[in-house]
Amino acid sequence: MSRLDTPFTRQVGIDVPLICGAMYPCSNPELVAAASAAGGIGIIQPVAMTYAHGHDLREGIRLIRSLTDKPVGFNAIVEKSRVLENQMRRWIDVALDEGVRFFITALGNPSWVVEAIHGAGGIVYHDVTERKWAEKALSHGVDGLICVNDRAGGHAGPKAPEVLMEELGDLGVPLICAGGIGAEADFVRALEMGYAGVQMGTRFIATTECRAHDDYKRAIIRAKASDIVLTDKISGVPVSVINTPYIERVGTRASPIARRLLLHPRAKYYVRMYYSLKSIWQLKRASLQGMSYRDYFQAGKSVDGVEGIESAGDIISRFAAEAS
């Protein structure tokens, strides 16, 4: 049996067990479509679609559908916020109406998403970083787990991919390795460990289809794993970024007041909302406008495997050939 034939590919209906992960602001429709057209699956990030790239969500999904008829996925953030939840419910309704049936949830209780998606015959995977969150997600009915490890970009987890596999491998659902996959050998190694697929983000920023600024793509190509640092100044929790001169100047720690508020059971939601709104603006500016706006370039330690800018299709084809 081919290593490409996994419980994940069979469940979702794709050829290559490879997810082009949702990225704000880098998940433009053309990149999502290219990943799916090549046999993997691209994930729609609704804030990126609407705010960063200026598409009405329904129109953006239809643009993707004009480029490929292969399955695409949708990123549903379920952090506790009435405003965000109401908007996300509307977006999910649109995605379901447009035929999307694979959803990835993160940051909160996914039960209401699971209910809606399962009611439409869809599949839900949830981001986790350790067993207690995995068990909670499974108790809410998710179908698989995105195992975010310590090499991931964005909100990285604390544990190595090998540790996560050992910790979660007995849970009886497909596990996706998220973090540190930049080269073909990384992909094969994850599958041989027992993962049903991988999720890649950083590698897909340095592609011809991604609308990220060339400065961002060049920064990823130049960077090594040792250049990736964690900062809690973006969202209040550690985020993996490239250690640019700007990062060195402003530091990587939130203020003492902010750190105290983040520990408060009520205040933490307002602090996170403040950070989220601030980071949406900063990340959009830096990622799409380049080094004259070099606030933050998110990236994971998979930068070690990124040697140039190429098409998403070429990347997926090369990875698939290596694993066949």
Image (spheres, rainbow, N blue to C red):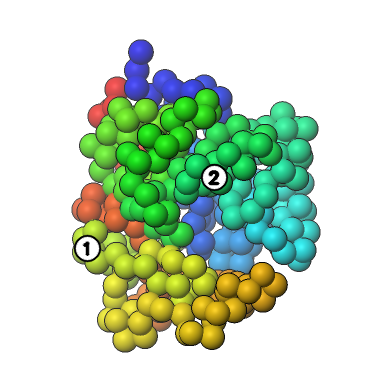
Pick whichever, 175 or 297, lies toward us: 175
- Local crowd size for mark 2, using a 10 Å CA cut-off: few (<14), some (14–19), many (≥20): few
In the rendered image, the quadrant that contains the C terminus is top left
Asked if one can make out residue 246 in the rendered structure from this viewpoint, the answer is: no
Name the outermost residue toward the top. Answer: 1
At 34% from the left and 79% from the top, the residue drawn is 247
Say whether disc 1 or disc 2 marks the residue closer to the N-terminus.
Answer: 2
Label 1 with label 2: CB-CB less than 8 Å: no
Of helix, strand and loop, which one carries label 2? helix
**Residue 230 appears in the rendering:** yes
Taking 271 as reference, is 42 left or right? left
Residue type beneath disc 2: Lys
Q: Name the residue under label 1.
A: 226
User: Measured from the top left, where is residue 34 in percent x and y?
Assistant: 45, 43
Q: Residue at x 29, y 81 (%)?
A: 248
Q: Which amino acid does label 1 sit on?
A: Ser
Q: Where is residue 28 in the image (x, y as percent from the top left)?
A: 51, 56
Task: State the residue in front, 213 or 63.
Answer: 213
Q: Residue sitting at 46 percent across and 80 percent down?
A: 254
**Quadrant where the image shows the N terminus:** top left
- When the figure is inspected, residue 250 is found, relative to residue 95, above or below; the finding is below
Image quadrant where residue 240 sits = bottom left
Residue sitting nearer the eye, 58 or 258: 258
Residue 80 horizontal/vertical position (percent): 70, 60
Q: Identify the residue under disc 2.
A: 132
Position of residue 36 measured from the top left corner of the image (x, y, whole percent): 49, 38
Give the left or right position of residue 142, taking residue 43 as reference: right
The residue sitting at 65% across, 59% down in the picture is 79
Tell how many labels.
2
Q: In this view, does 247 lie to the left or right of 155?
A: left
